[in-house]
Amino acid sequence: MNTLFSPLQVGNFSVANRVVMAPLTRNRAPGRVPNDLMVEYYRQRANPAAGMGLIITEASQISPMGQGYLDTPGIYSPEQVAGWKKVTDAVHAEGGKIVIQLWHVGRISHSSLLPEGAAPVSSTSRPAKGKTYIEGGFAEVSAPRALGIDEIAATVQDYRHAARCAMDAGFDGVEIHAANGYLIEQFLRDSCNDRTDAYGGSIENRVRFLKEVTEAIVAEIGGGRTGIRLSPITPANDIGQDANAQALFGQVMSVLAPLGLAYCHVVEGATGGPRDLTDQGIAAFDYAALKAAFPGAWMVNNGYDRALALETVASGRADLIAFGKAAIANPDLSRRLQADLPLAAVDFTTLYGGGAKGYTDYPVAG
Ligand code: 8OZ
């Protein structure tokens, strides 16, 4: 029987246990380049005998236009590749595995973060309601501009370039960030996408951008090095609910299934919030139907504690469990879970930005 602590082949790479560090934005890359403090943070969590079987990096923008928050790292320039190479070398020296999350925020951005003060880009020109974090503090997101057809093709190439950069930086793979109301989801959901061209309207059209991005990355680095993250019903970032999320994500699975992806990572419920949204009038979602349609490994996330994680892997409902706050506060998370030691709580005041405090100073147990 599989347990949370048994190894698994995930596409082209193997993991020593099923405890995964979720992608976690920390805003500690001034200049957008990974630095030595980040090397230490990931190194501390990398040895699977105590830490994670797999690390997913913080979301990393694929291009200058893909950035939406202050001091998030990129994966498109030679300096960024060199910075990430130090991270992957440190993780691999500990015996760990690491993939990088490829991110384009779309309309969840602010002009002050973008080249020449440009407007953010999206599937739509309608702004989201919400705030981002820029130089000096929180600010309303800026109104976006809808991408033209030729610009969509160029953005797909930016994803492909970023996947190549990830390989040059020594990553075991990439995770496509198609969740949480960012660019890919801005195309997916009919609550946001108001296009009338081949990328809007029908479910097939709205899934087209995700399909082209995923196919381009798979052509560049192979399906066995590619994962994807989805969040079918999250209300994050003012994305709104799709009129038929079950059918939409059914089509996403039809598109992904032939591509031989390493894994699919699903945020269940509201990102960082309740797992069950039916009391908010949001229809219950059948995640098992998606899993049944996907041939790769199945990763789940959102509010998993020890008991739910153990039961979920043992029952076969998922293969891998991604932990967010617990992975920040417990560099030795898999050892604590295995020995049933108490978990340290995360300090919310040091999540975004800052230095070593609340980042590399969380102790191991004992
Ligand atoms: C928290 C703060 C900023 C970004 C996500 C990348 O929700 C994020 C994110 C989370 O996927």
Image (cartoon, helix red, strand yellow):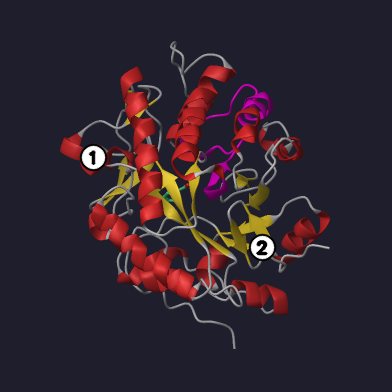
Q: Is residue 323 magenta?
A: no
- Residue 310: percent from left, percent from top: 76, 63
Observer able to see residue 133: yes
SS of the residue under disc 2 = loop
Q: At 76% across and 56% down in the image, what residue appears?
A: 312
Q: Quadrant of residue 14?
A: bottom right
Q: Quadrant of residue 109?
A: top left
- Residue 253: percent from left, percent from top: 65, 32
Q: CA distance from mark 1 to mark 2?
A: 37 Å
Structural crowding at the residue carrying mark 1, measured as other residues with C-alpha within 10 Å and reported as few (<14), some (14–19) or many (≥20):
some
Judge from the rendering whether residue 27 lies leftward or rightward of residue 273; answer left or right.
left
Q: Specify start and end residues of the magenta stretch as a single range.
A: 224-252
Residue under numbered circle 1: 114
The reply to whether dot 1 and dot 2 touch (C-beta < 8 Å) is no
Q: Amino acid at mark 2?
A: Arg
Q: At 46% across and 75% down in the image, what residue appears?
A: 93
Q: Amino acid at mark 1?
A: Leu
Q: Earlier in the sequence, mark 1 or mark 2?
A: 2
Residue under numbered circle 2: 18
Q: At 33% across and 43% down in the image, what residue appears?
A: 68
Q: Quadrant of residue 338?
A: bottom right
Quadrant where the image shows the C terminus: bottom right
- Residue 287: percent from left, percent from top: 72, 39
- Residue 177: percent from left, percent from top: 48, 43
Observer able to see residue 191: no
Tell which residue pokes out farthest to the left in this image. Answer: 116
